[in-house]
Amino acid sequence: MFKYALRLAGRDTFREMRRLLAVLAAAQVAIAPVPAYAANAAWVPGPAVAGIFDVDGPRSDGSLIVAGSAALYLMDAAGKLAPFARGPGGYHEDKGAEAYLANSPGFTVSAAGCSFTRDETFVLRLHVPIGVNRVSASGDESGSFANVPGVTTLNGIAFDTTGAFDHRLLVSGPASGKTVIFAIDCNGVVTVITRSAPRLEGGLAVAPPGFGSFGGSLIATDELGGNVYAITPKGAVSVVAKPKLPIGGDIGVESVAFVPAGFTARGGTVFYADRFTKGSPHPGTDRLLRLPSAQIAAAGVHDGDLLVATEGGATMVAVRCGPLCTTIPVVAKATKAHGEGHLAFIVNQPSPSPRPGHQPAQITTVMGPIAIGIGALVLVAVVAAAVILWRRRRRPA
């Protein structure tokens, strides 16, 4: 169109067009919407759980598994709690300990030729012999799943949801000033990934493939130094980020989790255990904190971003990794909360499909605001060229 206009109007006319286009382009930029993000999200107190220290899931029915002092609960999407695994064969161990847990997604471990059962719960066993207990999906059976040797305790657990670790259960524990990372298959066979990871503790997560160069790595935190680390299936360790968050024992970065697909679009809630800790500057409330997806999206967080929360005050940032990693503040104001364990999500179910014969409202998907703006500029430019040409031709010789 521009070449056609140039042939019609000549060079002088084209110079006038360029000046007009510059003015129009500046106006287009000035009126284009610019997103404004603010780190003003705030946790909302949820249901009370005595001695709460962890939450994970969701299970196949949409509920979360919640850990209190020597007790497990199921919580539905409405926030209603129900005791779980309380019968004679249920879970009754490690009262008062931070025996973090992981809900089984039911994946197959190819090398072992077996699968984890969907909705089984795996809980750290912090008394001798140190290891992992398994609680059946129905909650009527609990017992030892695997012993984990060579560590003084265990302080992290998560399932590999990507397959980079062959969908095994990953567990961390301290030894000789370092952290040992173990992978446990569905037969209970324990393999060491590395014995030389830096000090780590808290909620763990495996990065999805789109998380920059760290996709498929185990992501863990060091509350004392403030680093967020990535550990590959071969045991190599690198720093993902060091967010501008408080550092120190019972204060620094504690929990990580990746925002699941559909969370910011369909809506939902992220949950974090707020454990009562007597004598702490952040004493906690023994409640399950919640944060609506709308507040997370308003902070500029996308699906696939990494959420990183602190233990003291439950402040939180998001980390987004492509060629480089950037940090996005989410919860900036520290409270008296004492965060522990994992961050867990409930994602709203998608809207039902339209009824047969029902015609949904038409939505323009091809021409977005920018494309429409460019089209308008082109149309105005051509019209301007034609008007200028018409005026030139009407001038007396």
Image (cartoon, rainbow, N blue to C red):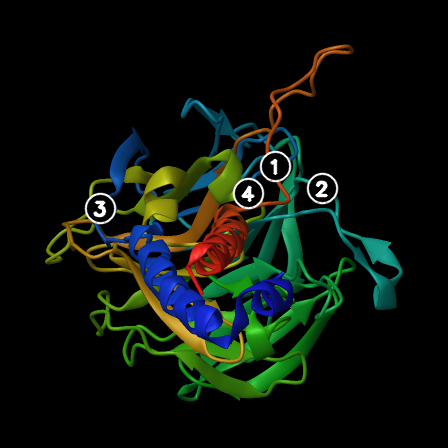
| Residue at the disc numbered 3 | 276
- Answer with mark 2 or mark 4, whichever residue precedes in sequence: 4
| Badge 4 density bin: few <14, some 14–19, many ≥20, Cα 10 Å | many
Query: Image quarter for residue 280?
Result: bottom left
- Answer with mark 2 or mark 3, whichever residue precedes in sequence: 2
Residue 153: in sight, yes or no?
A: no
Distance in Å between CA atoms under marks 3 and 1:
26 Å
State left or right for residue 53 relative to residue 133. left
Image coordinates of residue 94 in percent, x first then y, are 43, 50
Image coordinates of residue 302 in percent, x first then y, are 47, 54
Distance in Å between CA atoms under marks 2 and 4:
11 Å
Residue 179: in sight, yes or no?
A: yes
Distance in Å between CA atoms under marks 4 and 3:
22 Å
The image's mark for residue 36 is none
Q: Nearer the viewer, residue 325 or 134?
A: 325
**Are discs 4 and 1 less than 8 Å apart at CB?**
yes
The three-letter amino acid code for the residue at tag 2 is Arg
